[in-house]
Amino acid sequence: MHTDDVHDLVFAGISLALAYLTRYDAVAAIAATTFLVAGVTVMRQGRAKWRTMRRRALLDAVLVAGPGFSAFVVWTATSWLITGEALAQLSSNYGNAAILEQSGGGATGTLLGNTAFVVTAIVVLGPTLLIAGPVAAVLAHRRRDLEFLVAPVMFGSVLAFQAFSYITGSTFGFLRFYICAIPLAAIVVVQIFAPQGNPETRRTGKFHRSRSEHATAKTGVSAALVALSVGGMMVTGWAMLQPSLSAQQYALRYLFDENPSADADALAARRIIDSFSTERELAAYLDSQNLPEGSILVDTVYGDDDDQTSFDKTAALLQSHPDLKGIISPTTVGIAAAARYVSTSQYKGEVAVTGLGTPNQMREYVEDGTVAEFALWNPGDLGYLAAYAAAAIAGGDIEGEEGDTFEAGKLGEYTVGENSVVLLGEPFRFNADNIGDFDF
């Protein structure tokens, strides 16, 4: 804004490119910043000479947008080479569109209700904007300081992009999607203070401007801004604990609940926490299998615990991914349906099918070679362990408190875990060598 230094533009462009590689909604910030830079450059000699600055404005716009455009092209080309889809983050089976479809869509309220949620989310994440924003804008106008425009344009464009996406039903109503309100609020508070001195630059440009000197803010103003910021953080903290505003983050407080309650909010929160744990456990399991280099979890489909739906999903899965190497089904209905399809298809012996199933249900597919191995808890061992645990409590050997230990016969020693839970251990693996020993 002041230096007219080409190095500043290149640095800003590279930073925006890296932002795009982090989240695709940085496209909005790249576009908005490009227009801001072009607008500032074209007006550097005043309105009367704006036509003479058009070529320079175009060059400045290319410098700031070029790295981001290059990142977009490289990312898109790489996506196409690897997945066959240019914008896989949006269109693939793991992309935004697929997630929306699987979950029943994004925003489902009215236009007014969705807009109200967006405004509320921005306000609770950056409550100081309500007061500091207008004050900083007025002061910047009086100082003729264009630096004030940078933060609202960059962060505001991302917030506008997210707001439009949610209101039109293209994304979810997650509070974290509006997190740019936090750095925007912090920068606006800082901009209430008059900038002192000129920014350092490697090479001052032809049209540089020196900052005007202004008095610094008084102590009372500084104290008021500190109090405003502290109050803003308290508002944001409160918002993160509200299920209606923060559908994911509010669950975190239940991690510190020493006496878990059974109310609806607590149960819903624990389900959210457990869902993240399941994903981590599945990822850890896949990592432990030492799969060949380049192995990819290509798709997630839902059979809805229905036999025919699971059968049809298996057929569609193999048609979409003919080089698929394995199917993992966490439900007894799903694994049986998948095995039934594979057993009569060209993929028998080529595609591994495993997951959770019962011996009687899976016996046919193990014996004909469709399934090499699957898992399930062993009800005999579960009953055996439960009997020993009950005997230990009845005999006064343990009180059921976390950390208590007891002997469970042939199963060995067990330790009582959190919430007085005793885990049997790894699931039992059924294969051709032992499936004949079970009848359930």
Image (spheres, rainbow, N blue to C red):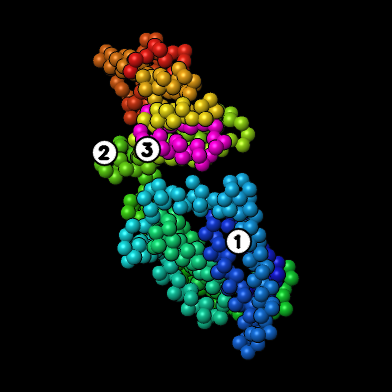
Image quarter of the N terminus:
bottom right
- Residue 382 image-quadrant placement: top left
Q: Which residues are magenta?
A: 307-332
Which element is circle 3 on?
A: helix
Which numbered circle lies on residue 262? Answer: 2
- Compare marks 3 and 1 and give the one earlier in the sequence: 1
- For this rendering, which residue is in front, 265 or 89? 89
Type of the residue with mark 2: Ala
- State if disc 1 and disc 2 touch (CB < 8 Å): no
Type of the residue with mark 1: Leu
**Residue 369 drawn at (x, y percent):** 49, 20
- For this rendering, which residue is in front, 387 or 334? 334
Q: How many marks?
A: 3
| Residue 229 appears in the figure | no
**Residue 399 drawn at (x, y percent):** 29, 21
Q: Is residue 432 magenta?
A: no
Which element is circle 2 on?
A: loop
Judge from the rendering whether residue 19 lies leftward or rightward of residue 161; answer left or right: right
Which numbered circle lies on residue 16? Answer: 1
Reading the image, the residue beneath label 3 is: 309
